[in-house]
Structure formats: structure tokens, C-alpha cells
Image (spheres, coloured by chain):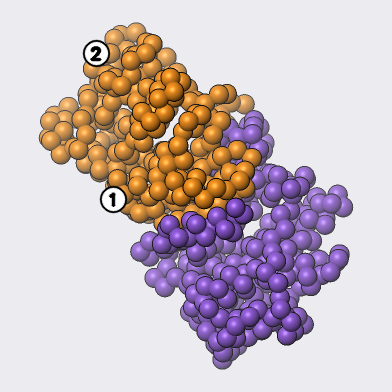
Chain colours: A purple, B orange
């Protein structure tokens, strides 16, 4: 049984499963696990590991339109080196500061593989789920897509400084707060835009018609089929959101990050320039 | 660098580190990671894994004197079997129900070793830390000690039904709420009573004089040096708490679990029947 089929089992067992974070009253909570083999290519700094793993949970909070309240992490490793732990905690602390929240601690665990498990909580009285998209809205993404794919290229090329810099993304918490005011549905693009659109389509029972010329491919991404990698590589942790078209201009002015309208919410099917956009996504960044 | 030294590095870097859970306003949050090799001996059911891993985080919430609000988990495995995931989620759900809180979902992750990472949140306007013990108080523990040691014996003996039953402990959330009204300091006994006392002693700058005849050794524990195992094996997830002696009788009446006064808070040193009680604890339950 693959991970997606397995997730549907979890979804069937737990009412709250399905959005980027679970909602409990005015609190949202999320938990994630990242590890060396699949998420931290050779050359990933411990600082970037701390930043990125805690950032992944903060991105889930952002996707709900919530204000981040706190984050915690477990750092697991086969052995503990002071410099590595210090760097991990500094990265974790800095990504929290970048979104005006607090890294409040965590734990260590003896694991065979370097593993980071992170949780974050946030507050909102109006969480945005994946099921509220309506035909007639537009669909938009924050920032650019393909930075993590570019990071992997840089790791491969031995430019670890650039790669680690690209790995330290800013979770879109502030943008999520603004977008929540008008969003029909929202999620993060951690599995790639293509898969995110399919997930939103399924949850909202709608379709999407995407215009390839409007997809904001990251300048840093220079290799291969740039559009396809931007659409399917994932791990960029941008927000994918549906909005009424007439809200876009006002929303853009309030955002701290560019917003690109990439297409329309339709009745059915996910298309790119009129052709079916396959449900492909998330190429793990490590050796599988 | 061993795990305790490494934790002191984390403690030096993050203000909130040091208690069983971090405090953010009226919220407490904790994250834990358990895995097959060290925490789930051969024969552990997936139901018990779900119960126990989520229970470990709920125990941390209990140790702060907070009401549990929600829990989440990541279940990591090399492959996903529907029956295993279902059982894990049922265990996670049931332990939450046992303490009147909600399992609100989680995620799956592809890991080499079966790994459960869990987080829980709780609410309290008066969190109990480890640093409030005062000489003259008594020190007490909830329930009995040695159930997890007995579970390991049962796994070794092939009685997996008994072992899994012993593994499904009730997190002391209700007791923690009651004890918080009078507690000087509190933590859970996940690393064993002996180590817990040393940790409380260090955090509160006090000592403890424990009377061995008052240690509530679990009836289920029948093998080996029962007292020593009850003191040092750990993983029982009972609460260790300091209280004014004159509060004990009234507190006991309000508790849903037996409370055993095991000794006194003193100025310095941790002793058992007058002799030094070594800072030994937490024998991992799996093959190391």
C-alpha cells in the first residue's frame, strides 16, 4: 500500500485528517517528520536542517491562515555533536523568528538516521481548509516555484552554500494571514503545485485550468524542463490559494510576497494550457 | 557527547527547555519520538505503539498540570499495511479518549525503522515546573512503578497479550490537574523514579530522602531486584510530585489513582534509606 493510499486510511479513521493542520477550537496543530535519506541531501547544513524541518510545520500553520504561536522539534541522530545540535537549534530558532513566533524547545532522540520531527501550533478563528474552492475563483501561488529543485542542483554541483541558502525558505505565515480573509481554499505546495491542485480539486470537488505562462518559475532554477520541475518537484512551501478574482488586487497590496494568479477554478479536471495536468509530485531530494 | 550532555546544550540554547513540556501563554506543547529498536520490543502490537507513543506526550502534558487539548502523531514505517495503520490510529485515539482529549490526526512517513513521533498540547494558567520543590515538602508518586519492566519480562516470556496490556498505561492527566493545585514541582517518571528525583533535585536545588518501604512497586513486577527495577527502569509515566505534607490527605481524596508519599524534600542529596540513590535510569526496552 503506497503512502497516499495509506493516508486515505488515516483520513477515514480521523475526522480532522486532510488539511495541512488539524483544528482544535481556535488552535491549529501540525506534526511532520523529515530525515536524512529523503529530505537532507549530502551537504545539507545542520542549520538548514533545523530551519527547514521547523519551517515545514510553520508552513502548515500558514496554509491554514493561522498566526504561528510556537514550534518544537525532536532532533534524532546516531550520535550527538555539540556543534551540530547548536546549529540545528539556531536554524530552528531563526525560522521561528522569521515568522514572528518562538521556538520553545524540544528533545533529542537516538536514531539510526538523522531525523527531525517538528510540531507547530497556531491560532485562528477562521481556519482555511482545502474544501472551499468554488468555480469562478482564480487560483494563485505565493513566491516562486522551483527553489528546492534548484537547491538540489546546487548540492549536486557542490555549491553547498547556495544550496543551503535556497533550502532556508520563509514560511508564508504573514501571507497566509492576509490570504485567509478572502481564500476559498488554501494549502501549501510542499508536494508540488500539480499535486496540490489535484488535492484541492478532490477536496473541493472542482477543477483547475492553469496557464503555463503564468506559473512563477524561480530564477534560480536553470536546469532541465524548468516548468515541469517547478510544477512537480515540490518542497517549495509556497501557498496555493483560491480567491475571488476581484479580491486579487487589494490582497496583493497587503502581501509581503509576490502573488501570481496561475489560472481559474473550474467545474472539473486539472489542466495546463487545456491539456490534462498529471497528478505528479514531490520528488524526494535525497537518494531513494 | 551523550544524550544528557547534549540535552544540556539544548537547554542552554532554548529558554523554555527543561520541563516536560514548553509553556506558551496558557498552552503547553510537547513532542516525543519513539521507535522500534529502543521502545517497541518484538511482539508490541501496533495498537500498543499508537497508545504508548501518544500516551508519552499526554504524560508530559499531565506533568505540567495541564488539561490535554489534542494530540497528533506521525507514523513512520518502511512499508504501510492497512491493518497496522488502523491499529496504530485506534491505539492513539483510545489513549486520547482515556484522558478526555482528542486525537486529531497526523501524517505518515517512509522510515527505515518503525518510528512514531507524537505531539500534544494542553491548557493551564498555572503550569507546574521542575524547579519549585521546597525542603519540608513530601515527595509522592502516582500509581505503581515497574509496570513497563514487567511488560518487558512478559514480552521475553512470550506473553504478548499481557505485555501489550501493561504497555497501555493511562496518562495521569486527571491526576496532574488535581496535583497542580498544591504541587511545588512535578514531572513524569518516564526516566524512572531515581532519575526523576535527581532531575527535580537539580532543577529545584534541593535533595530527597526516600524510604524504600514506601515505594509502590507494581504487583505485576515479579522478577529480579523488584525495588531497584521499580526505581530505575522507567517508562512508567507516573507523576512524581512534591507537596506540602498537610495537603496530602485532601489531595488523595480528589485523585482517581493511588498516591504514595515516598519521602521528604531535603536540602541536598538524593538518598534511599539514608544511603545515596544513584542517578540511574531508563533502561531502553529494546535491543540496543
Label 1 is found on which chain of the structure? B
Residue A147 shows in the view:
yes
Badge 1 crowding class, 10 Å Cα cut-off, few under 14, some 14 to 19, many 20 or more, is some
Please give left or right for residue A204 compared with residue A83 in the image: left
* Position in image of residue B282 (x %, y %): 45, 24
Q: Secondary structure at mark 2?
A: helix
Q: Quadrant of residue B249?
A: top left
**Residue at position x 48%, y 71% in the image:** A129
The residue labelled by disc 1 is B100
Please give left or right for residue B220 compared with residue B151 in the image: left
Of circles 1 and 2, the one toward us is 1
Please give left or right for residue B183 compared with residue A180 in the image: left
Please give left or right for residue A207 compared with residue A273 in the image: left
Badge 2 crowding class, 10 Å Cα cut-off, few under 14, some 14 to 19, many 20 or more, is few
**Residue at position x 64%, y 34% in the image:** A112
Mark found first going from the N terminus, 1 or 2:
1
On-image quarter of the C terminus of chain B:
top right
| Badge 1 and badge 2 in a common chain | yes
Residue B194 shows in the view:
no
**Residue at position x 44%, y 23% in the image:** B158
Q: Residue furthest bottom?
A: A246
Label 2 is found on which chain of the structure? B
Instruction: Establish if B236 lies above or below A96.
Output: above
On-image quarter of the N terminus of chain B:
top right
> Which of B17 and A209 lies nearest the eye of the viewer?
A209
**Residue at position x 45%, y 37% in the image:** B45
The residue labelled by disc 2 is B213
Instruction: Establish if B98 lies above or below A174.
Output: above
Q: Secondary structure at mark 1?
A: loop
* Position in image of residue B252 (x %, y %): 16, 33
Instruction: Establish if A171 lies above or below B242.
Output: below
Amino acid at each position: 500500500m503506497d503512502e497516499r493510499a495509506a493516508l486515505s486510511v488515516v483520513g477515514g479513521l480521523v475526522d480532522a485528517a486532510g488539511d495541512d493542520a488539524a483544528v482544535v477550537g481556535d488552535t491549529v496543530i501540525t506534526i511532520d517528520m523529515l530525515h536524512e535519506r529523503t529530505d537532507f541531501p549530502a551537504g545539507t547544513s545542520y542549520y538548514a536542517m533545523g530551519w527547514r524541518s521547523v519551517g515545514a510545520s510553520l508552513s502548515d500553520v500558514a496554509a491554514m491562515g493561522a498566526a504561528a504561536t510556537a514550534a518544537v522539534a525532536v532532533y534524532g541522530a546516531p550520535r550527538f555533536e555539540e556543534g551540530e545540535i547548536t546549529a540545528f537549534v539556531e536554524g530552528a530558532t531563526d525560522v521561528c523568528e522569521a515568522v514572528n513566533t518562538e521556538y520553545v524547545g524540544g528533545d533529542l532522540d537516538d536514531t539510526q538516521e538523522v531525523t527531525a520531527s517538528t510540531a507547530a501550533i497556531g491560532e485562528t478563528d477562521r481556519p482555511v481548509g482545502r474544501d472551499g474552492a468554488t468555480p469562478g475563483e482564480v487560483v494563485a501561488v505565493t513566491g516562486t516555484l522551483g527553489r528546492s529543485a534548484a537547491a538540489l542542483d546546487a548540492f549536486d554541483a557542490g555549491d553547498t552554500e547556495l544550496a543551503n541558502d535556497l533550502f532556508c525558505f520563509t514560511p508564508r505565515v504573514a501571507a497566509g494571514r492576509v490570504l485567509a480573509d478572502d481564500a476559498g481554499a488554501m494549502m501549501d505546495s510542499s508536494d508540488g503545485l500539480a499535486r496540490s491542485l489535484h488535492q484541492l480539486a478532490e477536496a473541493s470537488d472542482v477543477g483547475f485550468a492553469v496557464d503555463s505562462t503564468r506559473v512563477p518559475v524561480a530564477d534560480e532554477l536553470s536546469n532541465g524542463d524548468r516548468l515541469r520541475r517547478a510544477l512537480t518537484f515540490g518542497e517549495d512551501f509556497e501557498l496555493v490559494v483560491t480567491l475571488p478574482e476581484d479580491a486579487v488586487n487589494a490582497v496583493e497590496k497587503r502581501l509581503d510576497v509576490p502573488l501570481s494568479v496561475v489560472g481559474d477554478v473550474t467545474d472539473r479536471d486539472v489542466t495546463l494550457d487545456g491539456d490534462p495536468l498529471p497528478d505528479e509530485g514531490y520528488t524526494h531530494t535525497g537518494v531513494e
